[in-house]
Image: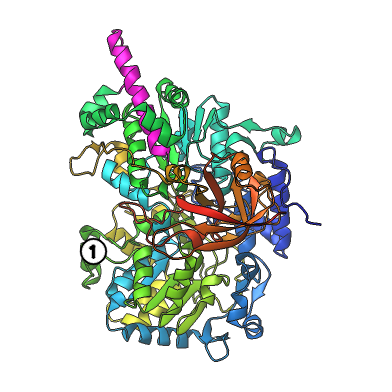
């Protein structure tokens, strides 16, 4: 008898279910009391920044600023379980490779530096100095610095990331494949084109003033749950929240705040979305084009009736470039095309536009449901166009808000992790350090994988993350890593990337965000991070390190740098001993960090000035730039509907997951328990396919390169999702994303636009 993997969905996000989950995760650490004490210091002025999401913290005061997934992130790091040298002595790498992501990371924290021994197929302990010396010798022996790839995860601190980019550029390359290449690259590209700054323009306080909030292609209930508290407060004071998401997500429907005693006592909840519309995958650009069309129609009607324009004519005339061309492009786009591509009716689009027209202050916020398509840059430009019509950029309670994922992915970019650095930044580095900086643009993630495959790259160093599981085309990426001469992973726990060693491979264990970082004199070191609202604040761990053999990310980078480029020009080890010195260098080379060390020690830190938020546009025209391109010829969803038994797949996270880290096997908001190999499908599509809930199938990627891409043995789950589209979890389904399917201008993998078919296996 087969036990069903489908169960009751949570009636609301948050609530008692969240509290129960928090307790369960803290118990799993083996030290629940210390874990609970740690949570009281999460996102506090005298504590550590949560190693989870990048949602902003309150700029003043103190409160409980953690969520269910924050508890999971802290518990995952603070576990009592240890992956010691004995563990690796008992297990061959080829055997560990057979474990799931969930199983391998459950073995706990790394405790010693390790070197791969090919003869025994095991990792063996190695001394720190020996590891640094061998890594340095191998990097120097490559002959050309461009033969090495230097990856960065978004959890690295500003200090570690700045030291990393300085080392790599002193070494001689701009090869910085970065986690942002796989998520919000399209946001940065589009916003730099439109407003001159590749970041959002809002601060957390703007959510307290907005009359309408458009939430596009994101699921805050799972990915950044603290955002639900701000959306709930906005809804309670009467703000209208319009959701565009193909999938019905519980957190965007109702939320029960675990910190609201009355709501918890009465098992109540607060409705979040005023309007919830479900466009087709990739149809957001058409939906926003339709709303602009409705706004122009309302403006024409107002002017014809002798009323005032509904547009912000002063803003358009003073601050904008290209408005007439955009208006012409909208006029040339017919409603039939808009409805077909968006999958929404004209009435649905006009109702959403009416909310926009009735609001004085509007925020548009989006995430990876927007950024991981072929035409993501064009979509974000369209969102920006729409917001400019009534001047909703650069004033209180209004603006653009791309919600970043990992806790410091935005900060890493700010301090120089960029394969395409600007000349001004390189000039500043040269002036500060007296070293020539490489000017040729380097590799992003997809280019780095290509270089590994063709042999032009021979070394990979990963500053955190799980590169092999975060990237597309999983089988190709494994091949790429295992062809290398050198792989180095700086990490807190074992993961699958470590099990794909090159000829010579090291795992270097580092401190976690929650742990005390002490220098050689026993002094506590402070790091800094930047959130999605451009707030920079300090973070200091409070837990005892998982092992006395751990080193900070900064110390590990310094050790590799000293062994590779020497310390004649830069005293790397001195910088690792005193992070204030690193911050002095950041202040001297990056605008906005004036008086960095003093301001960082203020409670809640400080805000990095955003010129676009002050209506200063760093674009070629010195104005906001409208874009006026046509809609895409066809989205992947339209392609699927036009074919026989083909579907448009998007990958997303379960509720028991953060990025590639899997905390558990449940997804209670979607009613899935004990299972991750799941395909969510519309019930009518399931019936038409000749299948039912719980039936199994292989998922086959459909691409034109002749490569067979199959994700095996997945179970169907009926769900409220548009017909012709399906969804499932990454990293399990990353195997289906072709390496050469990437966003136009962003080069981001199209993980929300994968064409698939199914081979039915058996009934449940």
Residue depicted at 55% across the width and 47% down the height: 726
Reply above or below: 460 against 399: below
The percent coordinates of residue 109 (x first, y second) are 61, 71
Residue depicted at 30% across the width and 37% down the height: 614
For the residue pair 227 and 594, the one nearer the viewer reads as: 227
Does 299 lie within the magenta span? yes
Residue depicted at 54% across the width and 60% down the height: 731
Question: On the image, which quarter does residue 39 sit in?
Answer: bottom right
- Give the residues drawn in magenta, as a range: 283-311
The percent coordinates of residue 156 (x first, y second) are 45, 63
The residue indicated by pointer 1 is 426
For the residue pair 77 and 596, the one nearer the viewer reads as: 77
For the residue pair 648 and 245, the one nearer the viewer reads as: 648
For the rendered model, the colour scheme is rainbow
**Residue 270 visible here:** yes
Residue depicted at 60% across the width and 34% down the height: 253
Q: Dot 1: within a 10 Å radius of its alpha carbon, few (fewer than 14), some, or many (20 or more) residues?
A: some
The percent coordinates of residue 751 (x first, y second) are 46, 54
- Quadrant for the C terminus, please: bottom right
């Amino acid at each position: 008898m087969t036990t069903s993997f489908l169960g009751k969905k949570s009636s609301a996000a948050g609530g008692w279910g969240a509290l129960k989950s928090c307790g369960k995760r803290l118990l799993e650490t083996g030290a629940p009391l210390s874990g609970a004490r740690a949570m009281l210091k999460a996102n506090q002025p005298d504590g550590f920044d949560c190693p989870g999401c990048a949602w902003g913290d309150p700029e003043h005061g103190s409160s409980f600023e953690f969520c269910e997934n924050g508890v999971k992130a802290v518990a995952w790091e603070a576990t009592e379980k240890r992956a010691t040298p004995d563990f690796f002595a008992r297990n061959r790498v080829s055997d560990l490779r057979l474990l799931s992501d969930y199983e391998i990371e459950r073995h706990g924290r790394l405790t010693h530096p390790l070197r791969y021994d090919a003869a025994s197929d095991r990792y063996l302990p190695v001394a720190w100095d020996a590891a640094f010396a061998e890594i340095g010798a191998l990097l120097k022996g490559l002959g050309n610095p461009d033969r090495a790839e230097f990856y960065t995860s978004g959890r690295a601190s500003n200090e570690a990331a700045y030291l990393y980019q300085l080392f790599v550029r002193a070494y001689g390359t701009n090869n910085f494949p970065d986690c942002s290449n796989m998520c919000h690259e399209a946001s940065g590209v589009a916003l730099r084109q439109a407003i001159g700054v590749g970041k959002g323009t809002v601060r957390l306080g703007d959510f307290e003033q907005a009359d309408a909030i458009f939430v596009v292609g994101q699921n805050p209930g799972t990915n950044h749950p603290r955002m639900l508290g701000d959306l709930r407060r906005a809804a309670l004071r009467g703000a209208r929240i319009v959701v565009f998401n193909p999938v019905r997500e519980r957190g965007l429907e109702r939320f029960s705040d675990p910190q609201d005693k009355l709501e918890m006592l009465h098992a109540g909840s607060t409705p979040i979305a005023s309007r919830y519309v479900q466009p087709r995958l990739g149809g957001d650009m058409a939906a926003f084009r339709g709303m602009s069309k409705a706004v122009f129609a309302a403006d024409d009607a107002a002017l014809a009736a002798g009323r005032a324009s509904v547009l912000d004519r002063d803003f358009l005339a003073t601050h904008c470039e290209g408005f007439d061309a955009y208006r012409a492009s909208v006029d040339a786009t017919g409603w039939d095309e808009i409805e077909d591509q968006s999958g929404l009716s004209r009435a649905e689009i006009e109702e959403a536009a009416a909310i926009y027209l009735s609001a004085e202050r509007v925020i548009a916020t989006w995430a990876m449901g927007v950024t991981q398509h072929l035409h993501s840059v064009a979509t974000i430009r369209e969102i920006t166009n729409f917001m400019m019509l009534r001047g909703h950029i650069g004033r209180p309670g209004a603006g653009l808000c791309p919600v970043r994922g990992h806790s410091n992915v935005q900060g890493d970019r700010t301090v120089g992790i960029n394969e395409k650095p600007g000349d001004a930044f390189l000039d500043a580095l040269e002036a500060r350090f007296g070293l020539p900086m490489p000017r040729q643009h380097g590799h992003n993630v997809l280019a780095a994988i290509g270089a590994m495959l063709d042999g032009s790259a021979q070394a990979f160093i990963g500053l955190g993350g799980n590169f092999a599981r975060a990237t597309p085309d999983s089988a190709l990426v494994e091949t790429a890593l295992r062809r290398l001469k050198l792989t180095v992973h700086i990490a807190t726990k074992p993961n699958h990337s470590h099990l794909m060693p090159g000829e010579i491979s090291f795992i270097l264990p580092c401190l976690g965000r929650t742990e005390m970082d002490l220098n050689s004199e026993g002094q506590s070191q402070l790091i800094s991070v930047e959130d999605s609202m451009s707030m920079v604040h300090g973070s200091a761990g409070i837990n005892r390190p998982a092992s006395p053999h751990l080193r900070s990310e900064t110390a590990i980078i310094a050790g590799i740098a000293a062994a590779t480029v020497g310390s004649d020009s830069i005293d790397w080890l001195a910088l690792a001993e005193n992070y204030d010195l690193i911050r002095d260098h950041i202040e001297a080379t990056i605008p906005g960090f004036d008086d960095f060390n003093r301001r960082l020690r203020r409670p809640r830190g400080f805000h990095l000035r955003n010129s676009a938020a002050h209506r200063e546009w760093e674009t070629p025209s010195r104005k906001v730039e409208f874009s006026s391109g046509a809609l895409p010829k066809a989205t992947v969803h339209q392609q699927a509907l036009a074919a026989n038994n083909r579907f448009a797949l998007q990958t997303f996270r379960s509720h028991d997951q953060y990025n590639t880290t899997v905390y558990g096997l449940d997804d209670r908001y979607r009613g899935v328990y004990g299972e991750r190999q799941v395909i969510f499908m519309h019930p009518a599509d399931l019936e038409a396919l000749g299948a039912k809930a719980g039936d199994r199938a292989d998922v086959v990627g459909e691409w034109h390169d002749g490569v067979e891409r199959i994700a095996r043995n997945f179970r169907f789950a009926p769900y409220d999702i548009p017909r012709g589209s399906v969804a499932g979890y990454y990293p399990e389904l990353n195997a289906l994303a072709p390496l050469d399917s990437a966003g136009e201008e962003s080069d981001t993998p199209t993980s929300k636009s994968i064409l698939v078919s199914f081979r039915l296996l058996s009934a449940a």
